Image: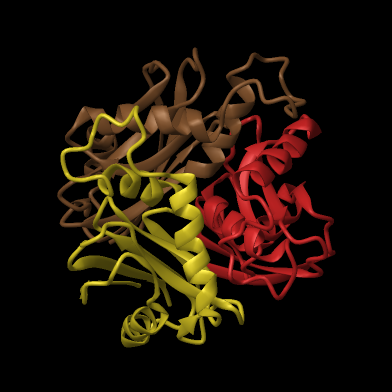
Chain colours: A red, B yellow, C brown
Amino acid sequence: MIFQEEISLTPFPRGFHLITDLVTEVIQSSGIQTGTTQVFILHTSASLSINENTDPSVRLDFESHLNELVPENQAYYQHNYEGSDDMPAHIKASLLGTSVHFPVFSGRPRLGTWQGIYLGEHRNDGGVRKLVITVNGA
Amino acid sequence: MIFQEEISLTPFPRGFHLITDLVTEVIQSSGIQTGTTQVFILHTSASLSINENTDPSVRLDFESHLNELVPENQAYYQHNYEGSDDMPAHIKASLLGTSVHFPVFSGRPRLGTWQGIYLGEHRNDGGVRKLVITVNGA
Amino acid sequence: MIFQEEISLTPFPRGFHLITDLVTEVIQSSGIQTGTTQVFILHTSASLSINENTDPSVRLDFESHLNELVPENQAYYQHNYEGSDDMPAHIKASLLGTSVHFPVFSGRPRLGTWQGIYLGEHRNDGGVRKLVITVNGA
């Protein structure tokens, strides 16, 4: 069985944000008990990843370190007409990824105790972001 | 329903290249309307990722910045007998990824307006690269 | 058909380790001939990726370079009460990824000749790591 739904997120400020509960709701509405979920973001300057779900300072450190890894205003950037945060946002999105995937078990995401789903907003003003969630299983 | 096909790509020069159209053709030939696609590259020094599909300078900036993130000739590299571009190519491939995954809807890739599939060729002379495309759905 | 199994790994030292054989055994026990596999790690400071399976120096160079990309003791890290290796381990896990995905063909992983599955242990003493392996196909 395949279940697929598109959802729109309320705009997030630049940084990393937990969206586990939103995704869990969609999975539960599918009725699928065992299988896998694909969460896909329809954008090129925001990312999806899975990491620590409790201490908010982890998400701040992600933002700080990603800004070190992919600084703004590098002399070699040619794509800069959308602002200095744009090209770094594209690169961050590809380093972290455009989708996350995890098992479904007993009708819920089968994540580790400390795992949550991160939406990485890499633009200063990214606006509404859309996800397509596909659950595959029985 | 599962549809699986292996394809060989014409050799690409080092850098990032759009392969969305090639992948779309395979998906359309599967006849699957709703589901997911996995595109997997059978190599360790080329990558797959999803990013901006219009301005070619984005792909040039990816190449420039990945060369900053993973420089050649680091003193600590031990694996260097295949040339100075080899070990960085392995690391770039793992940072960006060996596969991309996205929804299928109405028999086509369900990508965002600005999203395309990038083949990252990280060797100077990578030769023919092979992909396995698996479409799962109904 | 969906097959899902959770396995526990013997603790690994910090660094990169091949786990292809362990994963292949699970896939073969599923009886599935054609489809896809998702391998998911239930932790936030260890990663899964796919890279070169023969020369052990590649895995050492991954460890060396990831330590350059994500150094310990950065002044801006706020999350440091679990030790200096902790926050870098979280970031490395997200850069490399929490899951790998590849085709299954003829009842086996369809990987390239030189590809193997890496468990990246990013903590000094990470202990037992658990994987959930889901095989989807026919």
Height in image: B66 above or below B134?
above
Height in image: B133 above or below C76?
below
Where residue A102 sits: x, y (%)?
53, 48
Q: How many marks?
A: 0
Height in image: B113 above or below B132?
below
Where residue A111 sits: x, y (%)?
59, 39
The residue lying toward the viewer, choosing from A10 and C67, is: C67
**For the point 31% across and 39% down, which residue is it?**
C117
**For the point 32% across and 50% down, which residue is it?**
B89
Q: Given the current orientation, which residue lies at the most extreme front position? A: A75
Q: Quadrant of residue A54?
A: top right
Where residue B21 sits: x, y (%)?
39, 84
**For the point 83% across and 58% down, which residue is it?**
A12
Where residue C106 sits: x, y (%)?
15, 57
Query: Looking at the image, can residue A91 be seen?
Result: yes
- In this rendering, position of residue B97 left or right of residue A43: left
**For the point 67% across and 15% down, which residue is it?**
C82
Q: Quadrant of residue B136?
A: bottom left
Height in image: B7 above or below C120?
below
- In this rendering, position of residue C65 left or right of residue A57: left
Query: Looking at the image, can residue C135 be seen?
Result: no
